[in-house]
Amino acid sequence: MMKVLTGSATLLTGTLIAALTGYILWRGIPYITGDLLLTGPSYLDGHIGILPDLFNTFYIVAATLIFVLPLGAGSAIYLTEYAKNKRIVGLIEYAAEILSGIPSIIYGLVGMLFFCQFLNMKTSLLAGALTLGIMNVPTVMRTTQESLKTVPQGRRLLPQKRNIWI
């Protein structure tokens, strides 16, 4: 009975997702034009364009990656390979798990208060990128840690430097 109910719920959910996606695409694709994608909005002639928004999205993602990748991957490498005190490593991993569970709206509010108000960065790309960076560091750190743990011990050791002149 449970298999039938689970299968029915899965089928219903998949059907609803496919129907909603199809409806949105069917109604929305005719309005996506080159003019919409390649121009900016103009309030004078009532023109709608999203090119500046696309560029801003690219900029904030790139700026966030500049902060997140070195910090998240570096901390994961340190915790997995070099940290000696297992108690502190466990505490940091626990804190990362807690930070992963915080809703993004809380990160947004704290980022706005800290970066925009306290540090007087105003509403800026840098403030948004730093907020997104803080939000994503735990995820990058835990993912990198789990990836490093799957590497066999023999592959972790660096080859010894050989003197070829002897």
Image (cartoon, helix red, strand yellow):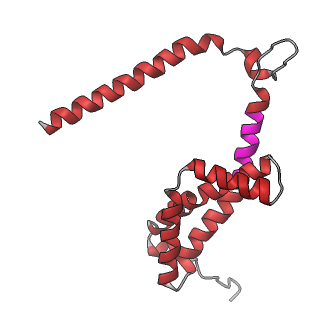
The residue closer to the viewer here, 106 or 125, is 106
Residue 64 among magenta residues = yes
The secondary structure that most of the magenta stretch takes on is helix
Q: Is residue 62 left or right of residue 81?
A: right
Query: Does residue 17 sit above or below 30 in this rendering?
Result: below
Q: Nearer the viewer, residue 38 or 45?
A: 45
Residue under the image location 59 percent in, 75 percent down: 78
Residue 82 in sight from this viewpoint: yes
Quadrant, the N terminus: top left
Query: Looking at the image, which residue sits at the far left?
Result: 1
Residue at x 26% of width, y 31% of height: 9
- Looking at the picture, how far across and down is residue 10, in whole percent? 29, 32
Identify the residue at horizontal 68%, vertical 63% (top origin): 70
Compared with 107, 55 (above or below) is above
Which of 117/20 is in front?
117
Quarter of the image that includes the C terminus? bottom right
Is 56 above or below relative to 39? Answer: below
Q: Which residues are magenta?
A: 54-65
Q: Nearer the viewer, residue 137 or 95?
A: 95
In-image side of 126 versus 144 (left or right): right
User: Quick check: 8 above or below 67?
Assistant: above
Q: Quadrant of residue 74?
A: bottom right
Q: Position of residue 49 (x, y in %)?
A: 77, 21
| 136 with respect to 10 (left or right) | right
